[in-house]
Amino acid sequence: MKNVKLIHVSFDEVENFTPRVPEQRCPNEDETIPRICVAPTIRNALSAIPQAGEVIYCMERLHLPIIIHAYYIESDSVLMPKELVDKVPDAMGTKEMWVTKVPDAVRRVDFELVNPAIAKRKDVNGTCERVVIGYDSLRRVKFQDNWRNLATKLIKGTDKIEHFMCNKPDISYRTFMSNMDDELLKALIRKEG
């Protein structure tokens, strides 16, 4: 499939673009086919990320810049949304596509989401969640690390920030933020204030 615009969006920096079965998947999503999840636009890609709305909601509450890493991918090995309807239930709505081989080329651009709109809704599986319904604009920014932005916001002292960065949780930023309960979020907001 030539000349298809492919964008992979992540809250975490991605070093290796080898297809894999994602650890975090939507309910009823295929757990056997290694892939890189992509979409034709950043908005579509965000809507396809499980818990993206939760992550952005927490980042907003903590007054963090909402940085996304957009990876523009070139590949001829792409499964289109209509080929995925039995593998990921919302593929037609999100326009999610899967790259099934190592991409020919990958280019990274970091953006800050300006004034994201988040709403609560039930997904196709009946789960109530926060979802990204839009944003005012995307502002291109220098490369950033969301973990470092969080540490810089909450920790005083460069040596303590560096200690945190060397010893941060062995989970993705998205997993950390999307699983933050209200008590931890309130405690971090109080600390920040």
Image (cartoon, rainbow, N blue to C red):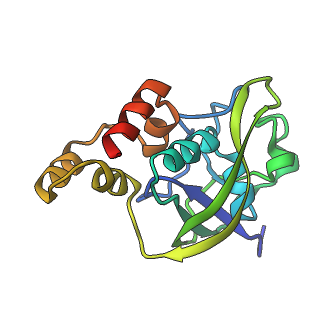
In the rendered view, does 176 fall on the left or right side of 119?
left
> Which quadrant: the N terminus?
bottom right
Q: Quadrant of residue 152?
A: bottom left
**Res. 10 in view:** yes
- What residue sits 41% from the left and 59% below the top? 15
- Front one among 21 and 193: 193
Asked if residue 167 lies left or right of residue 6, the reply is: left
Residue 126 to residue 98: above or below: above
Q: Position of residue 49 (x, y in %)?
A: 64, 45
At 88% from the left and 48% from the top, the residue drawn is 82
Front residue of 190 and 114: 190
Estimate the x, y position of residue 53 in percent, counting from the top left: 64, 43
Visible residue check, residue 29: no
Q: Quadrant of residue 184?
A: top left
**191 to the left or right of 50:** left
Q: From this view, report whether residue 172 is shown above or below residue 77.
A: above
Image coordinates of residue 113 in percent, x first then y, are 60, 63
Residue 9 sits above or below residue 177 on the image: below
Front residue of 65/28: it is: 65
How many marks are shown on the rendered structure? 0
Q: Residue at x 65, y 64 (%)?
A: 7
Position of residue 94 measured from the top left corner of the image (x, y, whole percent): 79, 49
Q: Nearer the viewer, residue 183 or 74?
A: 183
Residue in view at x 83 percent, y 50 percent: 81
Residue most extreme to the front: 193
